[in-house]
Amino acid sequence: MSSTSAASAEMWQRSEIPVVDLTGAHLRVSLLRKIVLWTVGAYLILNGGFDTVRFPPVGAGIPAGELVLLICLCIISVRTLLPRMGAAVWLFPIVVWWGMSLSRALIDTSVGGVWSFRDATQAIESLYLIVGFWLVNSVGNLQYFFNWLRKVLIALGFYGLLMPFSTTLQAFSPKLSGMSSGASSLFFQKVNSSSMLLWCACWLLIDRPANPRSTKVRVLITLFLVTFSIAYAQGRTGYLSVLAVGAILLLVKRRVAAKWVGILLFGVVIIGAISVSGLKLQGGRGHTISLNYITQEFESISGSAQSEDVEGSAKGVPLRLGWWRRIYSKMEASPQKMIFGLGYGIPLTDFHATGGVQVREPHDSYISVVARLGISGMLVWIMMQASLYFSWWRSYQLCKRMQWTRDQNNLLLLLIFDVLILVFAIGEDGFEKPFNAIPYYFFFGVVLRYGRYLRLTAAQAGSNTY
């Protein structure tokens, strides 16, 4: 190696020059890429409200996200992209997942009709892996994406703070009808707003501000967002999400993890002060905000209720266990059902919600996967997830070795969102909702292409890329 090349390699190894420089201005992308980003952004911000947007807007129309997916797949050269994806991730379980789940959905249309595709939401939306990989096909597009992502995070923060007024504001929102439900509001839904506020808080804590003087302000805003999210949302998923974020940060950024723990402790103090002050502030579920309620709500995971306030949450546990036992009894009826599942197009519960709406999923995405596709489908799904997360880990470790702090932060932001969805899916039908599944797989597609650029840049610097 020449002295010039050695100097260049040394510069890359010891500097913090990022592959993606967010200071770039006047970045442009194609109209189709903008449409994809607008669509993903709408799902992120409007969550459950945008789920009802479809074409045509009445009857069994095509959801907006799947229409955009179909257009992209018709234009993108998938045969060219897949080999390139294969260089970034173990593609075998992903392709098997697509083949197994999509073919099963198609076959089951003879039983469930259009509901087979509705139940196969995760299978269909997982094709956004390809869209995400395609969208950032240049460093300029990658820069544009992360600039867009931070704008979406700002919007999510302000939108999430409207949670206390959502019921009032929904009266002014346009209404759209779903396939099996009555009219619902397009705007001001708060299905996963608590998780999104936690994601915004993580962004403020992880990103380095351009002005160091604003660090304290960002920490205070983070404290407010975390405390508000946990205290107001009053959901067990939120408590588990906080712990999951702490575990991730402890694994990859211990200094940030220490700040996260400090913020949680201050949050506990604030909620405790509210409890002893006599203020009767009500959360999103109509219960008084207090440490006692949070403790009892967390304990209700076991199905026991320590007070009337958490009886509703506690009763939901045996209800779900009953759904799961019913699913298992159906699966054990034959080896074929145990191995290949019950299929799509049939409801997995016999429960009807308010208004007579059929609850089709058992409020646990992991149970849904094994119920729909059996043990074989669950194993393939686990291998696919392991492959995606290992690809992320490999890219993150490369950034750490090359001291590319900004790229580490970008990857970490995407990971935290995906882990929040994994946690959300424990107690809800998370992956069966497009506003969760589409960004989840779309972000992983971006991660795969991002890792490719990282390895190319590291190779140019003469560094080991693995």
Image (tube, rainbow, N blue to C red):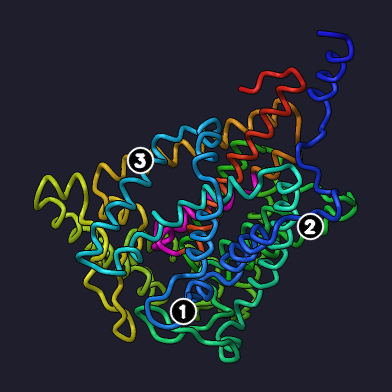
- Residue placed farthest to the bottom in the image? 171
Q: Mark 1 points at which residue?
A: 56
Q: Distance from label 2 to label 1 (Cα)?
A: 43 Å
Q: How crowded is mark 1: few (under 14 residues within 10 Å), some or many (20 or more)?
A: few
Q: Which amino acid does label 2 sit on?
A: Arg
Residue 329 visible in rendering = yes
Q: Name the residue under label 3.
A: 96
At 72% from the left and 39% from the top, the residue drawn is: 407
Q: Say if 351 sits above or below 199 in the image.
A: below
Q: Position of residue 341 (x, y in %)?
A: 21, 51
Q: Name the residue under label 2.
A: 218
- Region rendered in magenta: 412-433
Residue 272 visible in rendering = no
Q: Say if 180 sits above or below 422 in the image.
A: below
Q: Where is residue 261 in the image (x, y as percent from the top left)?
A: 64, 48
Comparing 7 with 396, the one in front is 7
The secondary element bearing badge 3 is classed as helix
Question: Where is the N terminus found, in terms of image quarters?
Answer: top right
Comparing 10 with 317, the one in front is 10
The secondary element bearing badge 2 is classed as helix
Q: Does the magenta stretch include residue 422?
A: yes
Q: What residue type is labelled 1?
A: Pro
At 65% from the left and 39% from the top, the residue drawn is: 450
Say whether marks 3 and 1 touch (CB < 8 Å).
Answer: no
The secondary element bearing badge 1 is classed as loop
Q: Residues within 10 Å of mark 3 (few under 14, many from 20)?
A: some
Foreground mark, 2 or 3, reads 3
Q: Where is residue 443 in the image (x, y as percent from the top left)?
A: 58, 50
Comparing 52 with 404, the one in front is 52
Q: Say if 10 sits above or below 81 in the image.
A: above
